Amino acid sequence: MNNELLNELTFFVLALFVGFEVISKVPTILHTPLMSGTNAIHGIILVGAILIAAGAHTPVEIALGVVAVTLATTNVVGGFVVTDRMLEMFKGRQPAKAAAKQEAKNK
Amino acid sequence: MTIVTALAYLVAAVLFILGLKQLSSPKGARNGNFTAAVGMVIALAATIPLLHFTRTGVTIIAIGVVIGTVVGVFGARMVRMTAIPQMVALFNGVGGGAAALVAVAELLRFGNHPAFSEAFPSVFSIVIGSVSFAGSMVAFAKLQELVTGTPITYPGQQVVNGLLAAAIIGFAIAVLAVASIPFSFIALMVLALILGVAFVLPIGGADMPVVISLLNACTGLAVAASGFTLNNFALIVAGTLVGASGSLLTKLMSDAMGRSLANVLFGAFGQVQRAATAAGGGQARSVRSASAEDLGTLLAYSQRVIIVPGYGLAVAQAQHAARELADVLEKRGVDVEYAIHPVAGRMPGHMNVLLAEANVPYEQLKEMDQVNDDFKNADVALIVGANDVVNPAARSTPGSPIYGMPILNADQAKNIIFMKRSMRPGFAGIENELMYGPNTVMFFGDAKDSLTRLVAAVKAA
C-alpha cells in the first residue's frame, strides 16, 4: 500500500466521523433543507468531471466528459439554489414583522 | 497537486463542515447553505491549475457548465414549491450519474489491468452511482406522479432483486479480475441501473423522502470513491461527509416516522396485499358529507379549531386560503392553531415552508408533540388534504404499512371536518378509518376551492 492511498484512507475515515458528528442534533423541520444541502455538496463531483473532461481526446472520452460535466453542474447549481429557496421561506418568521403586516391589512 | 490547490481544498473542506453545522440549526441554516456554496467555488477554482486543457476539453467543459447551470437554475427557481421534493431527487440522481461516468472515464484511461487500488473504487463508484441515478429517477417519477405512488410489487420480487445484486457482485469481481475485457463494465452499469429501478419501485410514495435521503448518502459515497480513483482529496472529503451525514439523516428521518429503515425499504413486500384486501372490504361503507354553509356555522361557533394541513393543501396551493380562513375565524374570537405532522406533505418541513410563505404566524404552527393533547379539547379538527398522518390504523392495525408511525390525534376532536378531493386512499395507498368515524364529516373538493367556500360561509354565519 503506497503512501498516498494511506493518506486518502485517513482522510476518508476521519471525514466519516466528522460527518456523523456534525449533524447529530437537527430539528425535524430542517431535515429536508439539510438533505438538499448535503445533496448540493456532493456536487463536488464537478471537480472530478472537469478533471476527466479537460484532457478528453477520443470520442468516448468527449461524450463521457460533456455528459458528466453537465450532470455535475446541474447537481451543484440546482442543489444550492433549491436549498436556498427552501430556506428563504423560513425568513418570514419574525413575529413582529408578521404582526405589523397584519395591522396594516386591518386598517 | 500544488500546495495552493491542497490548501484551497482544505479551506473548502472546512467550509463544507461549517456549512453543514449551520444547516442543522434554524438560525444559521440559510448562511450554512451559502457557506457550503463558497466552499464549492473555492474547490472548483483551485482545481483549474491541475487541468491540462486540450481545445476540445475547454469546449466540452464550457458546454457542460452552461447547460448544467441553465437547467439547475431554471429547475430550482421555476418549480412550484410543492414540487421541490422531486427536484431534490432529480439533482441527487444527476450527481450519482456524474460520479458513475467519471469513474468510467478513469477506468478507460487506466487501460488494461489497472492496479486493484484504482480499479476497486472505480467499480464501486460505477455501481453505487448508477443505482443512485436510476433510483432517484424512479423517486422523481413517483413524486411527480408519472408512475403510481403506491408500492409496485410482484411475487418473487425479493428473489429477483437478490439475484440482481448477486449478478452485480459477480460482474464486479469479473471486471476487477479480468479488466482487460474492454467495456466489460457496461454490463455492470446496466445491471446497477436496473437494480436502482427495482429497488425503489416497491417503496410507497410516502416513504420517498427517506429513500431520497438514502440515495443521497449513496451518491456521497460514490463521489468519495471517484475521489480515490482520481487521487483527489476534495472529492474524498466532501463525498464522505455527505455519505456519513446523509446516512445519519436517513436514520433520523425514519425515526421521525416511528419506523426502522429496514421497514421503510423492505416493508412493502408482503404487507401490501394484506392491506389491500383489508381495504377492499370497506368500499361499501358510507360517509357523511355536509354543505359549506353547515360547516361554516360549525366553525364560526367553535371555540377552538385545529387545522391539519397535508399534501392536498400543497397541491391546491391552498396555504393562502387556509390563512384567510384562520383570519376570519380569529376575528370572531375562535382560537386557531395548525398541527404540523413531522412528515406531512411530501417531505419533513414541507408544511412549515408553505405556511410560512402565506405569512402564518410562527407561534400558530404546532409540532405534533406540542399539539397532540390539545385535540381532545378542540371543537373542530379541520383536515385539509392530509390523510395518512391522521390515520388511526397507525395505532390500531398491526398489518398496516404505516403501523407504528406516530400520528396526530385528530380523531379525538369533537368534530372532524375531512377535506379531500375524493375517497381515494392517501399516498401510502391505504384506507383511512377516520373518514367513516361517527364525528367525521367529509367535505369534497379541491382544497383551495373548499377553503374559499368555507371563508364565505363563516363570514355569512
Image (tube, rainbow, N blue to C red):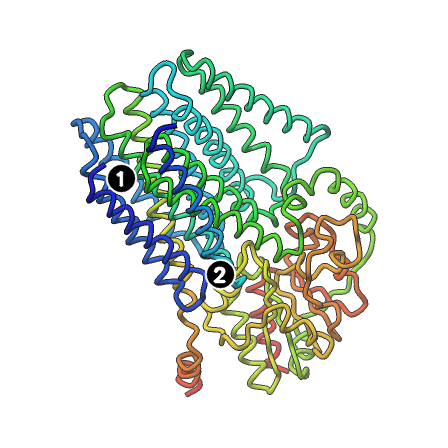
The residue tagged with tag 1: helix, strand or loop?
helix
Q: Position of residue B382 (x, y in %)?
A: 65, 70
Residue A57 occupies which quadrant of the picture?
top left
User: Could you tell me residue B159's position as x and y percent?
Assistant: 69, 27
Check if mark 2 and mark 1 are on a common chain: no
Q: Answer left or right for B248 relative to A12.
A: right
Residue type at the position of mark 2: Leu
Q: What residue is shown at x 45% (from left), y 61% (from top)? A: B24
Element at label 2: helix
Kindly give the residue lying farthest to the top in the view shown.
B181
A50 or B117, nearer to the observer = B117
Q: Is residue B294 left or right of residue B460?
A: right
Between B125 and A82, the one lying in front of the other is B125
Q: Which numbered disc covers residue B175? A: none
Classify mark 2: residues with Cα within 10 Å, few (<14), some (14-19) or many (20+). Answer: many
Task: Name the residue located 61 percent from the left edge and 41 percent from the top edge.
Answer: B148
Label placed on residue A30: 2
Q: Which quadrant is home to the N terminus of chain B?
A: top left
